[in-house]
Amino acid sequence: MSEEKSLLTIKVLPNAPLEVVGTVKIVLADGSEVEKTNAHLCRCGASKNKPFCDGSHRKVDFKD
């Protein structure tokens, strides 16, 4: 019986969030857990929905 491991990929998008491709469990600061398939994580610090991106990087003109 072989168990396949799925590879989680994290892409650094230019001047934008981290793109998580695959299924991931994220443990939030309050200890709650969120399981997502394909997520975008904030890098600019301006998101109102941290740790997830809400597009605020465009408003604050985030640059790498």
Image (cartoon, helix red, strand yellow):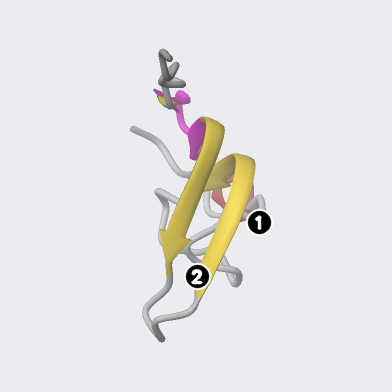
Instruction: Name the outermost residue toward the front.
Output: 1
- Residue picked out by circle 2: 33
What residue range appears in magenta? 10-20
Image spot of residue 4 (x, y percent): 44, 16
Query: In the image, 10: left or right of 22?
Result: left
Q: Nearest the camera: 17 or 25?
A: 25
Of circles 1 and 2, the one toward us is 2
- Residue picked out by circle 1: 54
The amino acid type of the residue labelled 1 equals Asp
Residue 41 on the magenta segment: no
Q: Quadrant of the C terminus?
A: top left
Which quadrant would residue 45 be assigned to in this image? bottom left
Name the element at disc 1: loop
Q: Residue at x 50, y 34 (%)?
A: 20
Q: Residue at x 40, y 48 (%)?
A: 43
Of labels 1 and 2, earlier in sequence is 2
Give the Cα distance between marks 1 and 2.
19 Å
Q: Residue at x 42, y 73 (%)?
A: 28
The amino acid type of the residue labelled 2 equals Glu
Residue 14, compared with residue 34, is above or below; it is above
